[in-house]
Image (spheres, rainbow, N blue to C red):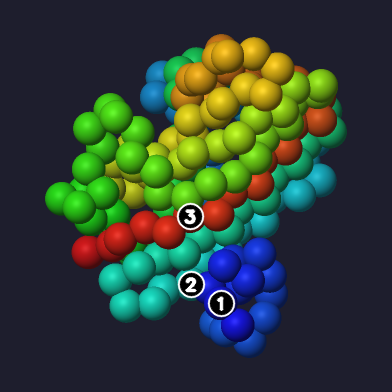
């Protein structure tokens, strides 16, 4: 079975481990609304860390302020020499996002040694921006995020 199949089916015998993802932000952390799904799994293979994250809330929280940040599991650090957070958004995975009637494609990128952020390409406009308080905010009904990552670690 390929790693991609394993990422899409993390509850298997391949050694996926659950962990808690906290959504913070560059300025003020958002408050989550009514959460239906908030699942994170990781699998380490050598110096590569695979992460699968699924989130869904039905009732809005607060937007917070700034770009949303997502932590990797405790005890790991991203190799920022190779996965450089340079502001050019090098992709470390893919995913989807939906907020009310808007959908988008996600490109995760390294923010720092313990966090990644999400760049969203909105399907109904030509907007491309990091997910945060002003773009795909969590202060919305029916917010969902599904992302798979492949990160080089130290």
* Rendering coords of residue 110 (x, y %): 34, 42
Residue at image location 39% in from the left, 24% down from the top? 26
* Rendering coords of residue 71 (x, y %): 44, 47
Residue at image location 22% in from the left, 64% down from the top? 154
Q: Which residue is mark 1?
A: 2
Q: Nearer the viewer, residue 57 or 10?
A: 10
Q: Which residue is mark 3?
A: 149
Disc 2 to disc 1: CB gap under 8 Å: no
Q: CA distance from mark 2 to mark 1?
A: 13 Å
Count of picture labels: 3
**Which mark, by number, is residue 43?**
2
Q: Nearer the viewer, residue 65 or 85?
A: 85
* Rendering coords of residue 48 (x, y %): 35, 68
Q: Secondary structure at mark 3?
A: strand
Q: Secondary structure at mark 2?
A: strand
- Figure quadrant of residue 120: top right
Q: Is residue 102 visible?
A: yes
* Rendering coords of residue 97 (x, y %): 67, 35
Disc 3 to disc 2: CB gap under 8 Å: no
Q: Nearer the viewer, residue 134 or 90?
A: 90
């Amino acid at each position: 079975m390929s790693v991609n199949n394993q990422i899409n089916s993390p509850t298997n015998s391949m050694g996926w481990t659950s962990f808690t993802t906290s959504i913070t932000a560059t300025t003020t952390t958002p408050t989550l609304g009514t959460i239906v799904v908030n699942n994170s799994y990781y699998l380490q293979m050598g110096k590569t860390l695979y992460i699968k994250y699924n989130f869904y809330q039905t009732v809005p929280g607060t937007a917070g302020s700034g770009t949303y940040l997502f932590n990797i599991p405790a005890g790991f650090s991203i190799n920022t020499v190779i996965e450089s957070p340079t502001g050019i958004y090098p992709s470390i995975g893919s995913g989807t996002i939906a907020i009310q009637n808007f959908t988008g494609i996600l490109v995760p990128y390294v923010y720092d040694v313990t966090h990644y952020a999400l760049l969203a390409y909105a399907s109904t406009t030509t907007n491309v921006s990091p997910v945060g308080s002003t773009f795909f905010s969590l202060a919305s009904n029916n917010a969902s995020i599904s992302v798979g990552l492949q990160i080089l670690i130290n």
